[in-house]
Amino acid sequence: MENQTSPEIFYLLPFSTTKADKLFLFALFLLIYLTGMLVNSFIILIIWLDNHLHTPMYLFLCNLSLVDLCYTTSTSPKLLNMILTENYTISFTQCFIQLGFYWMAGSIEDLLLFTMAYDRYIAICQPVHYHRFFNRNHCILITAAIWLLGCSNSILTTVSASKIQFWPSNIMPQYLCDAKAIMKISCAKTEVFFMEIYFEIFLLALGPFTCILLSYIRIACVILGMKSKEGRKKAFSTCSSHLTVLLIFYGTSIGVYIMPRSVHYRVVEQVLTVL
Protein backbone atom coordinates (compact mmCIF):
# COMPACT_ATOMS: atom_id res chain seq x y z
CA MET A 1 0.00 0.00 0.00
CA GLU A 2 1.45 3.36 -1.03
CA ASN A 3 1.93 6.26 1.31
CA GLN A 4 -1.15 8.43 0.97
CA THR A 5 0.36 11.54 2.51
CA SER A 6 -0.52 14.71 0.57
CA PRO A 7 1.95 17.59 0.07
CA GLU A 8 0.34 19.47 2.95
CA ILE A 9 -0.93 18.50 6.38
CA PHE A 10 -3.82 20.62 7.55
CA TYR A 11 -4.19 21.83 11.10
CA LEU A 12 -7.27 23.03 12.88
CA LEU A 13 -6.11 25.88 15.08
CA PRO A 14 -7.33 25.02 18.57
CA PHE A 15 -8.40 28.57 19.40
CA SER A 16 -11.22 31.02 18.69
CA THR A 17 -11.78 32.10 15.07
CA THR A 18 -12.95 35.68 15.73
CA LYS A 19 -10.69 38.45 14.47
CA ALA A 20 -10.34 40.13 17.87
CA ASP A 21 -9.33 36.86 19.52
CA LYS A 22 -6.82 36.13 16.76
CA LEU A 23 -5.11 39.48 17.26
CA PHE A 24 -5.03 38.91 21.01
CA LEU A 25 -3.61 35.39 20.59
CA PHE A 26 -1.01 36.58 18.10
CA ALA A 27 0.15 39.31 20.49
CA LEU A 28 0.13 36.88 23.42
CA PHE A 29 2.14 34.16 21.68
CA LEU A 30 4.53 36.72 20.18
CA LEU A 31 5.16 38.14 23.65
CA ILE A 32 5.73 34.64 25.08
CA TYR A 33 8.05 33.73 22.20
CA LEU A 34 10.14 36.92 22.39
CA THR A 35 10.32 36.75 26.19
CA GLY A 36 11.51 33.15 26.04
CA MET A 37 14.09 33.97 23.38
CA LEU A 38 15.42 37.00 25.26
CA VAL A 39 15.53 35.33 28.69
CA ASN A 40 17.23 32.17 27.46
CA SER A 41 19.67 34.11 25.26
CA PHE A 42 20.49 36.36 28.23
CA ILE A 43 21.13 33.33 30.47
CA ILE A 44 23.48 31.79 27.89
CA LEU A 45 25.32 35.09 27.40
CA ILE A 46 25.77 35.76 31.13
CA ILE A 47 27.07 32.24 31.79
CA TRP A 48 29.40 32.48 28.80
CA LEU A 49 30.89 35.84 29.85
CA ASP A 50 31.19 35.29 33.62
CA ASN A 51 34.05 32.93 34.50
CA HIS A 52 32.64 32.47 38.00
CA LEU A 53 29.62 30.74 36.45
CA HIS A 54 31.71 28.16 34.60
CA THR A 55 30.58 25.42 36.98
CA PRO A 56 28.81 22.10 36.27
CA MET A 57 25.36 23.32 37.34
CA TYR A 58 25.56 26.44 35.18
CA LEU A 59 26.93 24.44 32.24
CA PHE A 60 23.82 22.25 32.36
CA LEU A 61 21.62 25.33 32.85
CA CYS A 62 23.19 26.91 29.76
CA ASN A 63 22.39 23.78 27.75
CA LEU A 64 18.86 23.75 29.17
CA SER A 65 18.37 27.32 27.92
CA LEU A 66 19.69 26.28 24.51
CA VAL A 67 17.18 23.41 24.44
CA ASP A 68 14.37 25.82 25.36
CA LEU A 69 15.39 27.95 22.38
CA CYS A 70 15.08 24.85 20.18
CA TYR A 71 11.62 24.16 21.63
CA THR A 72 10.25 27.63 20.97
CA THR A 73 11.95 28.12 17.60
CA SER A 74 10.66 24.81 16.26
CA THR A 75 7.01 25.63 16.99
CA SER A 76 6.28 29.30 17.73
CA PRO A 77 7.20 30.98 14.38
CA LYS A 78 4.94 28.61 12.44
CA LEU A 79 2.13 29.09 14.96
CA LEU A 80 2.42 32.88 14.69
CA ASN A 81 2.40 32.66 10.90
CA MET A 82 -0.75 30.52 10.95
CA ILE A 83 -2.58 32.94 13.23
CA LEU A 84 -1.53 36.01 11.23
CA THR A 85 -2.14 34.63 7.71
CA GLU A 86 -5.00 32.26 8.61
CA ASN A 87 -3.20 29.66 6.51
CA TYR A 88 -3.30 26.66 8.82
CA THR A 89 -1.20 24.32 6.68
CA ILE A 90 2.27 22.88 6.89
CA SER A 91 4.14 20.84 4.29
CA PHE A 92 4.97 17.19 4.88
CA THR A 93 8.70 18.00 5.05
CA GLN A 94 8.21 20.95 7.41
CA CYS A 95 6.02 18.84 9.66
CA PHE A 96 8.63 16.14 10.18
CA ILE A 97 11.47 18.63 10.53
CA GLN A 98 9.41 20.25 13.29
CA LEU A 99 8.74 16.84 14.84
CA GLY A 100 12.46 16.04 14.76
CA PHE A 101 13.52 19.23 16.53
CA TYR A 102 10.64 18.98 19.00
CA TRP A 103 11.46 15.36 19.89
CA MET A 104 15.20 16.10 20.06
CA ALA A 105 14.64 19.01 22.45
CA GLY A 106 12.34 16.92 24.64
CA SER A 107 14.81 14.02 24.88
CA ILE A 108 17.73 16.30 25.68
CA GLU A 109 15.75 18.24 28.30
CA ASP A 110 14.75 14.98 30.01
CA LEU A 111 18.38 13.91 30.30
CA LEU A 112 19.59 17.37 31.34
CA LEU A 113 17.02 17.59 34.13
CA PHE A 114 18.09 14.16 35.36
CA THR A 115 21.77 15.18 35.28
CA MET A 116 21.03 18.42 37.15
CA ALA A 117 19.13 16.47 39.81
CA TYR A 118 22.06 14.08 40.19
CA ASP A 119 24.38 17.10 40.42
CA ARG A 120 22.31 18.45 43.34
CA TYR A 121 22.23 14.99 44.95
CA ILE A 122 26.02 14.68 44.93
CA ALA A 123 26.52 18.31 46.02
CA ILE A 124 24.20 18.01 49.03
CA CYS A 125 24.40 14.34 50.01
CA GLN A 126 28.02 13.52 49.07
CA PRO A 127 29.86 16.87 48.84
CA VAL A 128 33.26 15.26 49.40
CA HIS A 129 32.97 13.38 46.09
CA TYR A 130 31.46 16.23 44.06
CA HIS A 131 34.59 17.31 42.18
CA ARG A 132 35.45 13.70 41.38
CA PHE A 133 32.07 13.13 39.70
CA PHE A 134 31.58 16.56 38.14
CA ASN A 135 34.98 17.80 37.04
CA ARG A 136 35.34 19.76 33.78
CA ASN A 137 36.15 16.79 31.53
CA HIS A 138 33.31 14.67 32.92
CA CYS A 139 30.81 17.50 32.43
CA ILE A 140 31.85 18.02 28.81
CA LEU A 141 31.57 14.29 28.10
CA ILE A 142 28.19 14.07 29.84
CA THR A 143 26.85 17.04 27.88
CA ALA A 144 28.13 15.68 24.56
CA ALA A 145 26.62 12.26 25.30
CA ILE A 146 23.24 13.84 26.14
CA TRP A 147 23.12 15.77 22.86
CA LEU A 148 24.25 12.74 20.86
CA LEU A 149 21.62 10.50 22.45
CA GLY A 150 18.89 13.12 22.02
CA CYS A 151 19.72 13.68 18.34
CA SER A 152 19.94 9.94 17.62
CA ASN A 153 16.60 9.32 19.31
CA SER A 154 15.02 12.16 17.35
CA ILE A 155 16.27 10.83 14.00
CA LEU A 156 15.00 7.31 14.70
CA THR A 157 11.58 8.56 15.83
CA THR A 158 11.18 10.98 12.92
CA VAL A 159 12.17 8.41 10.29
CA SER A 160 9.78 5.88 11.82
CA ALA A 161 6.93 8.43 11.91
CA SER A 162 7.51 9.52 8.31
CA LYS A 163 6.76 5.98 7.10
CA ILE A 164 3.24 6.01 8.54
CA GLN A 165 0.38 6.22 6.03
CA PHE A 166 -2.12 9.05 6.44
CA TRP A 167 -5.66 9.89 5.39
CA PRO A 168 -5.76 12.19 2.32
CA SER A 169 -7.36 15.04 4.30
CA ASN A 170 -4.59 15.02 6.94
CA ILE A 171 -6.62 17.16 9.33
CA MET A 172 -4.74 17.33 12.62
CA PRO A 173 -6.46 18.69 15.77
CA GLN A 174 -3.28 20.36 16.99
CA TYR A 175 -1.11 23.37 16.23
CA LEU A 176 2.20 21.50 15.96
CA CYS A 177 3.60 18.19 14.73
CA ASP A 178 4.15 15.88 17.66
CA ALA A 179 4.05 12.09 17.73
CA LYS A 180 0.61 11.76 19.31
CA ALA A 181 -1.00 14.22 16.88
CA ILE A 182 0.53 12.36 13.92
CA MET A 183 -0.83 9.04 15.16
CA LYS A 184 -4.34 10.51 15.24
CA ILE A 185 -4.36 11.11 11.47
CA SER A 186 -2.88 7.78 10.46
CA CYS A 187 -5.00 5.57 8.21
CA ALA A 188 -3.02 2.45 9.12
CA LYS A 189 -2.49 0.61 12.39
CA THR A 190 0.11 2.39 14.50
CA GLU A 191 0.43 -0.04 17.39
CA VAL A 192 4.13 -0.65 16.66
CA PHE A 193 4.92 3.06 16.46
CA PHE A 194 2.72 3.71 19.51
CA MET A 195 4.65 1.10 21.51
CA GLU A 196 7.93 2.58 20.28
CA ILE A 197 6.90 6.01 21.54
CA TYR A 198 5.87 4.63 24.93
CA PHE A 199 9.13 2.69 25.22
CA GLU A 200 11.09 5.88 24.55
CA ILE A 201 8.96 7.78 27.05
CA PHE A 202 9.73 5.12 29.65
CA LEU A 203 13.44 5.10 28.79
CA LEU A 204 14.02 8.86 28.44
CA ALA A 205 11.24 10.33 30.60
CA LEU A 206 9.74 8.07 33.25
CA GLY A 207 13.07 6.34 33.93
CA PRO A 208 14.95 9.60 34.61
CA PHE A 209 11.89 10.99 36.44
CA THR A 210 11.95 8.02 38.84
CA CYS A 211 15.67 8.55 39.48
CA ILE A 212 15.05 12.27 40.02
CA LEU A 213 12.28 11.50 42.50
CA LEU A 214 14.51 9.12 44.47
CA SER A 215 17.34 11.69 44.43
CA TYR A 216 15.10 14.41 45.85
CA ILE A 217 13.72 12.11 48.53
CA ARG A 218 17.29 11.54 49.66
CA ILE A 219 18.08 15.27 49.36
CA ALA A 220 15.01 16.14 51.46
CA CYS A 221 16.10 13.71 54.17
CA VAL A 222 19.57 15.26 54.29
CA ILE A 223 18.22 18.84 54.34
CA LEU A 224 15.72 18.08 57.12
CA GLY A 225 18.53 16.50 59.12
CA MET A 226 20.66 19.66 59.03
CA LYS A 227 20.92 21.42 62.40
CA SER A 228 21.49 24.89 60.95
CA LYS A 229 18.40 26.75 59.73
CA GLU A 230 20.56 28.80 57.36
CA GLY A 231 22.13 25.62 56.01
CA ARG A 232 18.71 24.11 55.30
CA LYS A 233 17.54 27.32 53.62
CA LYS A 234 20.66 27.56 51.45
CA ALA A 235 20.50 23.90 50.42
CA PHE A 236 16.82 24.14 49.53
CA SER A 237 17.32 27.37 47.53
CA THR A 238 19.78 25.58 45.23
CA CYS A 239 17.05 23.07 44.34
CA SER A 240 13.89 25.20 44.21
CA SER A 241 14.23 26.51 40.64
CA HIS A 242 15.10 23.04 39.36
CA LEU A 243 12.06 21.58 41.13
CA THR A 244 9.79 24.18 39.50
CA VAL A 245 11.06 23.30 36.02
CA LEU A 246 10.62 19.61 36.80
CA LEU A 247 6.99 20.03 37.85
CA ILE A 248 6.07 22.03 34.74
CA PHE A 249 7.96 19.86 32.26
CA TYR A 250 6.99 16.42 33.55
CA GLY A 251 3.48 17.46 34.54
CA THR A 252 2.57 18.68 31.05
CA SER A 253 4.48 15.93 29.21
CA ILE A 254 2.91 13.09 31.18
CA GLY A 255 -0.50 14.71 30.80
CA VAL A 256 -0.19 14.91 26.99
CA TYR A 257 1.08 11.38 26.37
CA ILE A 258 -0.80 9.42 29.02
CA MET A 259 -4.17 11.16 28.54
CA PRO A 260 -6.74 8.89 26.83
CA ARG A 261 -7.01 9.21 23.05
CA SER A 262 -10.50 10.75 23.11
CA VAL A 263 -12.09 13.87 21.64
CA HIS A 264 -13.36 14.77 25.13
CA TYR A 265 -9.78 15.36 26.29
CA ARG A 266 -8.74 17.38 23.22
CA VAL A 267 -8.94 20.87 24.76
CA VAL A 268 -7.06 19.84 27.91
CA GLU A 269 -4.40 18.16 25.78
CA GLN A 270 -3.94 21.27 23.63
CA VAL A 271 -3.57 23.49 26.70
CA LEU A 272 -0.92 21.13 28.12
CA THR A 273 0.91 21.17 24.78
CA VAL A 274 1.03 24.98 24.81
CA LEU A 275 2.52 24.88 28.33
Image (cartoon, rainbow, N blue to C red):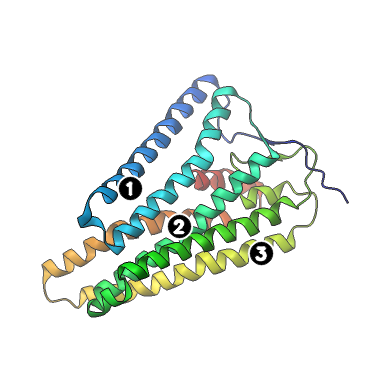
Label 2 vs label 1: CA separation? Answer: 16 Å
Locate residue 207, reporting x and y percent.
Answer: 50, 71
The reply to whether discs 2 and 3 touch (Cβ–Cβ < 8 Å) is no
Asked which quadrant contains residue 30, the reply is top left
Residue at 12% in and 69% down:
229
Label located before the other in sequence (2 or 3): 2
Residue furthest top as drawn? 19
The reply to whether discs 1 and 3 touch (Cβ–Cβ < 8 Å) is no
Instruction: State left or right for residue 122 relative to residue 259.
Output: left
Tag shown at residue 44: 1
Residue at 41% in and 67% down:
141
Q: Is residue 131 above or below residue 48?
A: below
> Depth check: 5 or 273 in front?
5
Residue at 17% in and 64% down:
234
What is the secondary structure assignment of the residue under circle 2? Answer: helix
* Label 3 sits on residue: 196
Locate residue 31, reporting x and y percent.
Answer: 39, 32
Label located before the other in sequence (2 or 1): 1
Asked which quadrant contains residue 235, the reply is bottom left
The kind of residue tagged 1 is Ile
Q: Is residue 8 above or below residue 189?
A: above
Locate residue 104, reporting x and y percent.
Answer: 54, 54
* Label 2 sits on residue: 109
What is the secondary structure assignment of the residue under circle 3? Answer: helix
Label 1 vs label 3: CA separation? Answer: 34 Å
Decide if residue 250 is in sight here.
no
> Depth check: 270 or 140 in front?
140
Instruction: State left or right for residue 145 relative to residue 38.
Output: right
